[in-house]
Image (cartoon, helix red, strand yellow):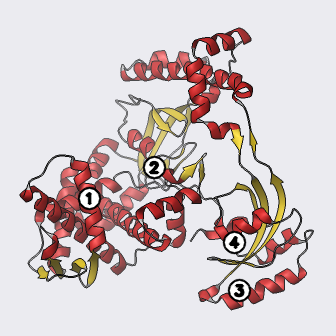
Amino acid sequence: MFEGITKRRKNPVVNFFGWAMLAIVCVIFVFIGFSPNSNFLGGGGAAAEVNGDAISLRDFKELVERLENQQKTPRDRDASRELQKNALNILVSRTLIVQKAQELNIFVSDNEVADAIMSIEPFFEDGQFSRLRYKSYLQQTRMTESQFEDKLRRDLIIQKMSSLIGYAANDINLMDDFDKKVDQAQLNVSYLMLQPEMIRKSPTKEEIDKFLTEKSKEVDNYFKAHSNEFSQQEQVRARHILIKAKDGNMDEALKKVKEVASEATAANFSELAKKYSEDPGSKTKGGDLGFFPRGRMVDEFEDVAFSGNVGEISAPVKTQFGYHLILVDEKKEATKTSFEEAKETIARKLWQKEIYDSLISEIEKKLADGKIDEVEPLLSTYGLSWKDTGFFSISKENIPGVGNSSEFLNVALTLNKEKPYSKRLVFNGDKAYAIRWKGAKLDASADKAFNQMDFFKKLMSQQRMNSMVQTWADSLKQEAKIRLNSDVIR
């Protein structure tokens, strides 16, 4: 699943109303109830069947528990039964959406699943994806990797379907036309980007000493909370050549990797990786994976990489991806910085952060009060100026100069000629943005101007979405064969 086993940080942006659409879908299924084609299962291991696909009791119980935790209020028997019915309805709706996606040949690739997993922040450690955290989560939830990936794949399919449904919000009978309008619609904005690095002023020795005296507890707390900043795990820099097991044929992969191994040396390993490796992420770099700590790679690969000697090529290593040859380039021993060594660095960092936070607060207040004329002189002190995105499609994930940020897009869509400035800052990672509207157009080739607000009001109209999704949901449910396990509602 994790192609080439290297870290991937791609935060795919959901179309700005995708999750809202999913919520609407689920709500509608909850309140319109099951279709006349519904009937009841007896007892057994499934909570329901939808067109022959079973909904497991485990999924049902997990969702009931989540809904109970969200409500956090005492429930009588009737309320508990209603919650169970809602949970079952939601699972039925999800199953119908996935089935419809399959019918339309809408799928989620292994790479998309791997990207999604590697973008889940609870699995991060020191800004990097940690397999240890991922495996710990699987153990806690008693799921295998395959089970978790299947669940996530279904969620991503539903996400895709939600986005597609949202595109049709203008008129359910004119989906193709509206889809084209969304693809053609373009915005042009400018932005001011703020980040901590813009505070270049350094405190004097006296200011650092004063900070350490007055805020020693903050410095100590920072050191304890960010211990990873002041220590470095043992790391290895390695190259590899991956031969995949095509159609699950491990014997053929082993045969091929042995042939490559017969001509491999430390000197020619990079060239052989470019020629033979089937890991697209490292192939063009001569198989170079860079430095990585324990917990980043699959166990079989990691064990060999950390136990190998620098300059030695391993025997073929079998993993879920196929067979690897591994060359260890460098090793770094674990290191740790003491508090005494780190405290001045921490004080300097916190001192600069206070200045930055104060500046952010001041700018946010001026934006909220509409005092944009007072913002620009303030920022000119730091050499900041407005930067243009140029016209970009609202259906694209990447905003020029900004990157992936659904929040940036959401705020930009609320601006217009009459109200060109954002009333707040938009945060994306450690950066903050003020946004200024510059223009909008529907057809880039013809440069046709259009009323942006009228168009996006239609696009974002909750009422039209509700009406459209309910029509769609009704049609799906009328055709579905739904069988419920009456024993699960107690």
Amino acid tagged 2: Asp
Looking at the image, tell me whether mark 2 or mark 3 is earlier in sequence order. 3
Q: Nearer the viewer, mark 1 or mark 4?
A: 1
Q: Tell me, yes or no, if residue 284 can be seen here.
A: no
- Mark 3 and mark 1 lie on one chain; the one further toward the N terminus is 1
Which residue position holds label 3?
A: 253
Q: Quadrant of the C terminus?
A: bottom left
Relative to residue 292, is residue 111 depicted above or below?
A: below
Q: Which of 479 and 37 is in front in this view?
A: 37
Disc 4 from disc 2: Cα separation:
43 Å
- For discs 4 and 2, the disc positioned in front in the rendered view: 4
Residue at the image point whose x is 66% and y is 38% from the top: 229
SS of the residue under disc 2 = loop
On residue 447, which mark appears? 2
Q: Nearer the viewer, residue 254 or 356?
A: 254
Disc 1 designates what residue? 65
Quarter of the image where one finds residue 476:
bottom left
Circles 3 and 1, Cβ within 8 Å, touching? The answer is no
Which numbered disc, 1 or 2, marks the residue closer to the eye?
Answer: 1
The three-letter amino acid code for the residue at tag 1 is: Glu
- Between the C-alphas of marks 4 and 3, the distance is 14 Å
What is the spatial separation of the Cα atoms under label 1 and label 2, in whole angstroms?
53 Å
Q: What element carries label 3?
A: helix
Of the two numbered discs 2 and 3 in the rendering, the one whose residue sits closer to the viewer: 3
| Mark 4 or mark 2: whose residue is earlier in sequence | 4
What mark, if any, has residue 371 been given in the picture?
A: none
Residue name at image x 91 percent, y 73 percent: 265
Residue 187 vertical position relative to residue 366 in the rendered view, above or below: below
Sequence-earlier tag: 4 or 3: 3
Quadrant of the rendering where the N terminus is positioned = bottom right
Check the image and report above or below for 395 versus 413. Answer: below
